[in-house]
Image (cartoon, grey):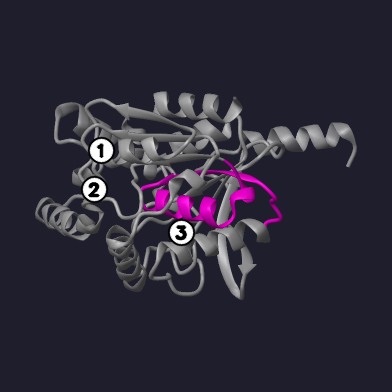
Amino acid sequence: MNDFSADVEERKMSSVKWKDVPTRSIDVGGAPFVYRELGPSSGVPVVFLHHLMAVLDDWDPRVIDGIAAQRRVIAFDNRGVGASGGSVPHTIEEMGRDAITFIRALGHQQVDLFGFSLGGGVAQMVALQAPKLVRRMILAGTGPKGGGGIEEVTKVAILAYIKAALTWSDARNFLFFPRTPEGKRSARDYFAALKERTRDRDQPISLQARRAQLEAIKTAGLSEPDDLSRITQPVLVANGDHDLMVASSLSAEMARRLPNAKLTIYPDSGHGGVFQHHHAFVSEVLDFLAN
């Protein structure tokens, strides 16, 4: 391919939006892992690690497309999630090992990580288990292993699902956004964005996967804390100021324990604060990754 053709191909790849990017598959330890990637092909890619009970179509395209405007973005279903094969592990340590194997299967020697909620816990495991693989990290709506209250996530989630069933709505209305006028507007905008993709959608998460993820979160919450001083990479820690799932104070605690961390707390928002404040979040992430 000559320089002109390569430039045309690069512009074409950079212009594709999340709603249209094709779903691909790669063999990882004998199991197919599905993933999507978009944005410029050069530079260190940003690997997205998603939240409890989420599949590819649960990523906010406003965040994906915003970051992919300048950086290569790779989002994938970890083992047993969505259309990926195998069974979901029962610990976040195993989930981290699977993520490492996936990244290396794609041929990457170094990546940036964006972990949201459960994905933030997995991102920490990746950085602890394969430190040379990680350049920088964004940890959003998450906390450290052994953090107080993390084991209560199941109770919080069940209550939200009961409310959702009674109101014929999505539980994330209650888990991600405050029940204020602004929070409700943000929730409507978020769910509208999730519906933009109409073709080639992912498979829903299985019951086994849900149970295994909840077990992994509970186990992590009751485990001894990790030595986060071992994570020396620059880390951006972000959350809303009233997170019902992972207390905002845990994000602050995690940032204090990380040697090279910056903490951002978004006002009047909850677990999905980075989606509610997506414009500010994307801008901060791009600045953080570029510096």
- Is residue 125 located in the magenta-colored stretch of the structure? yes
Residue 245: percent from left, percent from top: 23, 48
Q: Is residue 197 visible?
A: no
Quadrant containing the C terminus in the rendered view: top right
Viewer-nearest of discs 2 and 1: 1
Q: In what element is the residue under mark 1? A: helix
Residue that protrudes farthest toward the left in the picture: 166
Residue 94: percent from left, percent from top: 47, 67
Q: Earlier in the sequence, mark 3 or mark 1?
A: 3
Magenta residues span: 106-135
Residue that appears at 31% across and 65% down: 219
The crowding category of the residue bearing disc 3, from other C-alpha atoms within 10 Å (few below 14, some 14 to 19, many at least 20), is some
Do residues under tags 3 and 1 come within 8 Å of each other at their CB atoms? no
Query: Any mark on residue 249, and which?
Result: 1
Residue annotated with mark 3: 202
Residue annotated with mark 2: 245
